[in-house]
Amino acid sequence: MHWFLLGVAILFETIGTTALKASEQFTRPLPSVLVVVAYGMSFYLLAKVLLYIPVGVAYAIWSGLGIVFIALIGWFVFAQRLDGPAVAGIALIVAGILVINIFSDATPH
């Protein structure tokens, strides 16, 4: 269940960050409210996850996957292109998440 909650926390973080871009520096009310609600839910769920997963591991996965998802949303929704080094860096983040989940004894399996 804690992995599911972490996934939902990542989803809310991704929604919040997307809404942050759409809020246009908090000048648009609906996206601005969505930022606060989505980040609030994300942090609440992340706090629940920390009862089961070490903070460093949970935060690495939460922030790392958030970066990947936001980069993809930036690419497809906001037409923000990434160059080779940016793609390589994001690939290293994904590799790091995989190493943690597959090989680390610090995560509950």
Image: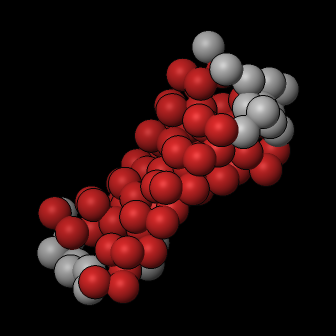
Percent position of residue 84, x then y:
28, 83
Percent x, y of residue 16? 46, 53
**Coloration of the structure image:** secondary structure
32 on left or right of 79: right
91 or 19: nearer the viewer: 91
Quarter of the rendering occupied by the C terminus: top right
Q: Is residue 40 left or right of residue 8?
A: right
| Picture layout, residue 66 above or below residue 104 | below
Dividing the picture into quarters, in which one does residue 82 lie?
bottom left
Residue at 26 percent across and 85 percent down: it is: 83
Residue nearest the viewer, comparing 71 with 39:
71
Q: Position of residue 108 (x, y in %)?
A: 73, 23
Q: Quadrant of the N terminus?
A: top right
Relative to 87, say whether 3 is above or below: above
Name which residue lies at 44% across and 40% down.
11
The answer to which quarter of the image holds residue 78 is bottom left
Along the line of sight, the residue nearer the viewer: 47 or 2: 2
Q: Vertical placement of 7 versus 55: above or below?
A: above
Q: Is residue 37 visible?
A: no
The answer to whether residue 68 is visible is yes
Q: Position of residue 24 (x, y in %)?
A: 36, 76
Toward the top, the furthest residue is 1
Using the rendered view, name the quadrant where residue 29 is placed: bottom left
Left or right, 53 with respect to 73, comes to right
**In this figure, what is the number of numbered marks?**
0
Residue at (72, 39) in percent of width and height: 104
Residue at 57% in and 56% down: 96
Please identify the residue farthest to the front as the structure is shown.
103
